[in-house]
Image: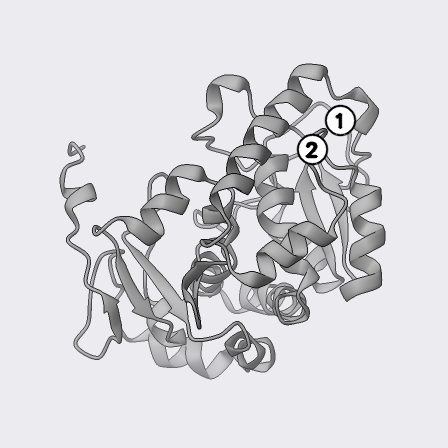
C-alpha cells in the first residue's frame, strides 16, 4: 500500500492470493536456506551496530521477542508474545495493500508485514520494505505500550484523514516518527524509527554524519515537511521522550490540518527561525549528489 504517493507500507507483491482483508499465510516452512542466511547476515549486522544507537525500548523489545539470527521469525510466535504484552499481532500481507486496509489493520492492532526477504545483492538498499524492515525494524517497538497506542491511533486517524483528503499530511507524521524518528535519552540521541533501525548505513548517517538536520519535533512543522523516499533523510525530528507520543495518540488532528492548510510546504532540508535545532546540518551529502 502507498498513502497516495507518500509513505509505503507493506512489502513487494508475491504470488500468494490474499483473503478479503489482504492477509495471507506467512508460509514460514517455505523459506529457503539462502533466505534464512540473508536474515542472519542482516540480523547480526544490526544487532552489533544498534547497542548505544537504538533507544532502550527498541533493544528491550528485540531481546524479549522470539527473534534471533538463526531464522526468519515465525509471525505466530511473534504475535503470541506481542498479544500478551500490548495486544498486537503480526499478520502477513502479499504486498502494498490499499490505504483503508492498512489503516484498518493498525486500528485493530494488527501489524501487516511482508513475508518476502531481499536478495543477497540488496543488503544495503531495497526499494520495497521486506520482512527484515517490517519485523526487525517495527515489531520491537510494538512491545512498548506508548508506541503500541500511538500506532493504533495512527490507524484510526488514517481512516479519518483519508476521508478528509489530508492523508499526505498525516503520512508525514508516521514517516518522521515510526519510520525515521529519533529520541533524546539521558545518555544521548537514539534511534526508534524502523527505517533507520533496519538500515546499517542510515543508522550511521542519522546519528554520526554532519549532513542532516536534527530538529525538535513539532507536529504542525512535521505535517508541512516533505521527505525523501529514495535516499537518506535531510532532516530528522527528535522527541524529548517517547512519552511525547502519548499526546499525539489522543489529539484531534482536524484543527491542525486546518491550521497548516494555508501554510507553505517545506522541503526536507529547510530550517525555520522558530525551529529548535539540535544539529544544523551541513547538507553536504545531498549537495554532493548528482542532479536529475
Placement of the C terminus among the 4 image quadrants? top left
Q: Secondary structure at mark 2?
A: loop
Q: Is residue 146 above or below residue 14?
A: below
Along the horizontal axis of the image, is 42 left or right of 260?
A: right
Q: CA distance from mark 2 to mark 1?
A: 10 Å
Placement of the N terminus among the 4 image quadrants? top right
Along the horizontal axis of the image, is 68 left or right of 261?
A: right
Residue at image mark 1: 16
Image position, residue 42 (x, y; %): 55, 31
Image position, residue 40 (x, y; %): 62, 28
Residue 208 visible at all = yes
Residue at image mark 2: 115
Along the horizontal axis of the image, is 285 left or right of 248?
A: left
Residue drawn at point x = 63 percent, y = 71 percent:
146
Q: Is residue 261 above or below residue 282?
A: below
**Between 38 and 91, which is closer to the camera in this rendering?**
38
Residue 224 in which image quadrant: bottom left
Image position, residue 127 (x, y; %): 46, 32
Mark 2 near mark 1, Cβ–Cβ under 8 Å? yes
Amino acid at each position: 500500500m502507498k498513502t497516495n504517493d507518500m509513505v509505503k507500507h507493506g512489502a513487494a507483491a508475491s504470488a500468494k492470493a490474499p483473503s478479503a482483508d489482504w492477509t495471507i499465510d506467512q508460509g514460514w516452512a517455505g523459506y529457503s536456506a539462502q533466505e534464512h542466511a540473508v536474515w542472519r547476515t542482516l540480523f547480526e549486522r544490526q544487532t552489533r551496530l544498534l547497542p548505544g544507537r537504538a533507544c532502550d525500548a527498541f533493544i528491550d523489545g528485540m531481546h524479549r521477542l522470539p527473534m534471533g539470527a538463526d531464522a526468519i521469525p515465525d509471525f505466530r510466535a511473534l504475535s503470541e508474545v506481542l498479544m500478551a504484552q500490548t495486544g498486537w499481532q503480526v499478520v502477513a500481507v502479499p504486498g502494498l495493500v490499499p490505504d483503508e486496509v492498512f489503516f484498518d489493520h493498525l486500528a485493530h492492532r494488527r501489524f501487516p508485514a511482508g513475508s518476502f526477504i531481499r536478495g543477497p545483492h540488496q543488503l544495503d538498499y531495497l526499494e520495497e520494505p521486506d520482512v527484515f524492515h517490517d519485523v526487525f525494524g517495527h515489531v520491537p517497538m510494538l512491545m512498548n505500550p506508548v508506541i503500541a497506542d500511538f500506532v493504533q491511533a495512527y490507524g484510526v486517524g488514517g481512516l479519518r484523514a483519508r476521508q478528509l483528503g489530508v492523508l499526505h499530511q498525516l503520512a508525514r507524521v508516521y514517516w518522521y516518527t515510526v519510520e525515521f524518528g529519533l529520541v533524546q535519552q539521558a545518555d544521548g540521541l537514539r534511534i526508534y524509527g524502523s527505517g533507520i533501525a533496519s538500515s546499517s548505513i542510515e543508522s550511521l548517517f542519522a546519528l554520526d554524519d554532519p549532513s542532516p538536520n536534527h530538529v525538535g519535533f513539532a507536529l504542525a512543522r512535521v505535517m508541512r515537511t516533505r521527505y525523501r523516499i529514495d535516499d537518506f533523510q535531510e532532516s530528522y525530528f527528535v522527541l524529548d521522550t517517547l512519552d511525547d507520543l502519548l499526546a499525539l495518540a489522543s489529539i484531534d488532528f482536524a484543527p491542525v490540518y486546518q491550521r497548516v492548510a494555508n501554510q507553505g510546504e517545506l522541503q526536507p532540508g529547510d530550517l525555520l527561525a522558530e525551529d529548535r535545532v539540535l544539529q544544523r546540518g551541513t547538507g553536504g551529502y545531498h549537495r554532493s549528489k548528482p542532479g536529475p
